[in-house]
Image: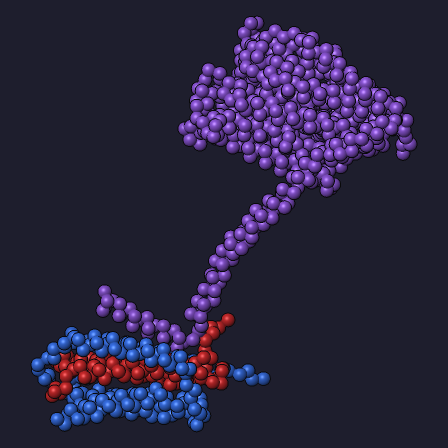
Amino acid sequence: MGDYTYTILIPLIPLFVFLFLGLLGHKMKPFVTGLIGTVGLGISAILSYITAFQYFIAGHVHGTGYASIKGFEIAWLHLTEKLTIHLGVLIDPISVMMLVVITTVSLMVHIYSIGYMKGDPGFYRFFSFLSLFSFSMLGLVLATNIFQMYIFWELVGVSSFLLIGYYYEKPSAVAASKKAFIVTRFADLGFLIGILMLSFNTGTFDFQTLTDPNGPAIAQAGGVAFMGMSVLTWSLIFIFVGGAGKSAMFPFHIWLPDAMEGPTPVSALIHAATMVVAGVYLVARLFPVYALGAPDALMVVAWVGGFSSIFAAVIACTQTDIKRVLAFSTMSQIGYMMLSLGVSGYGGEEGLGFMASNFHLFTHAMFKALLFLGAGAVIHAVHSNEIGEMGNLRKYLPITHITFLIACLTIAGIPPFSAFFSKDEILAAAFHSNKLLFAIEYIVAGLTAFYMFRLYYGIFWGKNTHYHHTPHEAPKVMTIPLMFLAFGSVFAGFIPFHDYVTSDGLGFESKIDWFIAIPSVLIGVVGIFIATLMYKKETAIPDKIAGSFKHLYKWAHRKFYMDEVYLFVTKKIIFRYISAPLAWFDRHVVDGTMNGIAGSIQFTAYAIKGFQSGKLQQYAYVFISGTVILVLIFVYLV
Amino acid sequence: MIQNIPLSYFLVISTMMFFIGIYGFLTRRNLITMLMSVELILNSVNINFVAFNRYLYPQQLQGHFFMLIVIAVAAAEAAVAIAIIINIYRNFKSIDVENVDEMKY
Amino acid sequence: MVYEVMFYLIGTMILVFSVLTVTSRRILRAAVYLLFVLISTAGLYFMLNYNFLAAVQLTVYAGGIVVLIIFSILLTSHLSERAVMAPLKQSLLSALATLAGATLTMMTILRFSFIPSGSAGPQLTITDIGSSLVSYKRDGYALPFEVISVLLLAAMIGAIVVAKKERTIKN
C-alpha cells in the first residue's frame, strides 16, 4: 500500500507561494517572483510524478485493481454526530492522472508566462494568482468528499475570476470576469442543491462510501421516488448542472468565449486544460453512482455533451478571432468527454467510455494547451487577435509553426498522434451504445478538422501582409514549453490507459477497432482536404459559401444569439420584476424601519428634554402631583 | 378646651391654607410672592401642631416647642431668601422666576 | 356660643385673606394680606389659651418677617407695578393638582377619628415654658434650643455674605 501522506504537500506548496507572492511580491524584482512561482510548481510537479510512479507502477501488485486510498484526512468541522466535514487527500487513478495533468500544464504555463508577461506592471500578481489557481484545482481533484470538492470548486471560480479580470483597466475584461463568475455561480446553485439532496438521502459526503458499488448509498437513495424519477437521479442531475456550468456545456457556455479577455497563458491553463474539465472530473468521480444508481442522469449527460459539441463546432467555423475559435473548440472537445462518460457502462469492457473520456482529457490537455500557447506566441508577434490581420507567418515563426501544425494534426485525429487513440475509443464507445450520438460525434470530428485547419492556414499561409514591424519568433522561454507539449501530444497516445484508469479500478484488454478507426481518420482527412482547398490560397470560395448559406452563416457567426437571450432575460425580466421590487422593499421597509426607530427615539428624546427645563415651578408641580398620585395609589388603591 | 369645636375643624382650616399656599407657589411669577406662599405653608403647619397639642396631649409641651422652632426656621429662611432675591435683582434687574432657569456655566 | 362665632369668624378671615394673598395683582397688597393672615392665626392661638405662642407669632412672624418682605418689595420693584399672572395652562394645572391634594388630605383626615383627651390640662405659665426650654432633664428642650441658635447664626452670616455688594477696585 505505501504511505501517501506526502501528497498533502502537492496542493500546499502553491498555496504558500500564493501567500508569499501576494503579500511580498511587490517588493521583489519581477523575474524573482516568476522564478519563485515556477520553482514552487516544479516541486509540486515532481511530487506528482513520484506519486504517479508509486501508485501506478511501484506499489502495484500485478493482477489486482487500483484501490482508492485516503492519503490524509482531518475532521475540519464537527457540527453534529452525523454532519462532519473532513478535508483530506484521496489517491485514486483519476486523481493521480489529474495531478500529473494539472501540474505539468501549470508548470509549462508558468515557464511560458515568464516570457509572455514580461514588462507587465502586475507581474507578481499574475504569478500569485496562478499559484492560487493551481492550489485550488489540486485541492479539487484530491478531495475526499463532495463538500471539500465544493469548497475548492468555488475557489477555482474565484481564481478564474481574478485571472480573467487581470487586465482590470479594460472594461471588457471586467465584464467578462463578472460574467464568468456569475454564470458559474448560478450553475453552482444546482450543484449545491444536488449535494444537499444526495448527502441527505445517503447520509454521507464521503466519496469512498458513496461510490462503493456494494455499499448502502446507491441502493438506499435509489428507492425514494419523486415525480417519476428517483431522488438519486434528481440529485445527480443537479450535480451535473454544476459541472455543466464549470465545463461550459450548453446552456451555460456563454462565459467561455468572453473569458478569452484574459491573458493567453491563463486561457491555456484554465480554459483549456484544467478548470473546464472540472465538470468532467466531477461526473467521473461520482461515476459508480451515476452508472449503477441513475442511468437516466447519464443519458442527460450524454445528450448535453453531444449537443454542445456540435453546437460549438458549427460556431467555430465562422469565428475570426484566434482565441475564440480555440474556445469553441474546447467546448466541443469537452462535449466529447461528457458524451463518452454518458454512454459508458460500469465494470470491465462496459467501462470503455469512462476510460476513453479520461484518456481524451489527458491528451486534450496537452494539445489544447499547446494550441493556446502557440496562439499566444502568434499574438505576441503580431499584436492582434484577428485572423484577418495575419498571414504567411510560417516564414517568421518556424518553431511556433511546427508545434501548431502538430497540435492541429492531433486534434484532427490523425494517427499516430495521441488524440487519434483517445478519440477513436470515444467513437467506439458511442457506436456500441447509441448510433445517433455516434453519428453526431462523427460529423463533429470532420468539422473539427475543418475549422482547425481553416485557422492554421489563415495564420501561417496566405500572401499577406504588411506588418507594422517584422514579426519575430518568441524567445526561448516561450518556445521550450511549446516543444515539450508537442512532445506530449505526439507520444501520450501510447500510454496504456486501459490498464490504469478504468471505471472499477481493474484493467481490461482494449484493442483498436479498425471498423471505427478507419472511417474516423477518413473524415478527418476529408476535413483537412476541404480546408486546404478553401483556405490555403486566398480564394473566393469561403465568401461564396457564406453567401449561399446566408442565414445559417449569420446565426453561427453571432453564436446563435445566446448572449442576447440571456441579456433579455436578465435585464427585462429579472431586473425589472424581481430585483427592482426587492430593492424598493429594502430601501423603504428595511431601511425605513431603522430610520423609523431612530426617528422615534429622537422624537422621544426631544419630548423628554422638556423635563429638565430649569423652571422652578415646573419642578414643584411635578413634585406635588407625583406625591398626590403616590398617596392615592398606596393609601387608597393598594 | 374649646366647647363644641371638634379638632377636625382646625385641621380643615390648616389643610386648606396649606394647599392655597401650594397653589400660590406654583402660580406666582414674582419671587417675593413665592416666598409669601411658603410662609403661608409654614403657618398652616404651625396651626396643625398647636391644635394637636391642645386637643390630644394637653399636659405635654412638644407641640409648643416644635412650633417655636418652626417659627425660628421660617424667620431664618426668609432672611436668607431675601438676601438671595436681592442678589438676583442686582444681576437680572428683575425678579421674575423665569430668569433663573439656567445653571452657571 | 361666643367661641363658635369667634372661631368661624377667624377661620373665614384666614381663608379669605390667604386666597387674596396668592391672587392679588399688586405685590404690596399681597404683603398686607399676608400680615392679616398671620394676625388672624395669632387670634386663633389666643382662643386656644396659648398666649405665649400667640405673642411669639405676632412678634416674629407678623412683626419681623412681614416687615422684611415689605422692605425687599420696596427695594426691588416699583410700587405701582402690576404683577404678571401665570399663563392659563399653568394656573389650571396647578389648581387641579392643588384640589386633588386637598381632597385627598381632607378625606384622610376626616376619616380618622381623633379621640380628644378628656382633661383640660394645667394652666401654662411663662415660668413653666421657660424652665422647660432650658432644662436638660427628661422633658427639657435645651438641645433644640441650642440647635436653633446655631441655625440662626448660620442664617445671619449667610444672609450677609450673599447680599453684600461686590467690592469695586479702587484706583
Above or below A525: residue B12? below
The one nearer the camera, A343 or A354, is: A343
The one nearer the camera, A411 or C142, is: A411
Specify the chain shown as blue: C
Q: Is residue A497 visible?
A: yes
Above or below A240: residue B11? below
The one nearer the camera, A376 or A250, is: A250
Q: Position of residue C45 (x, y in %)?
A: 20, 88
* Residue beneath the point at 78% across and 19% down: A527
Which of the 4 image quadrants contains residue B9?
Answer: bottom left
Specify the chain shown as purple: A
Q: Position of residue A248 (x, y in %)?
A: 65, 30
Q: From the viewer's perspective, tell me whether residue A83 is left or right of residue A342.
A: left
* Residue beneath the point at 44% across and 84% down: B95
Q: Position of residue A557 (x, y in %)?
A: 75, 33
Q: Colour of chain B?
A: red
Which of the 4 image quadrants contains residue A30?
Answer: top right
Q: From the viewer's perspective, tell me whether residue A39 is left or right of residue A379.
A: left
* Residue beneath the point at 63% across and 17% down: A435
* Residue beneath the point at 55% across and 33% down: A190
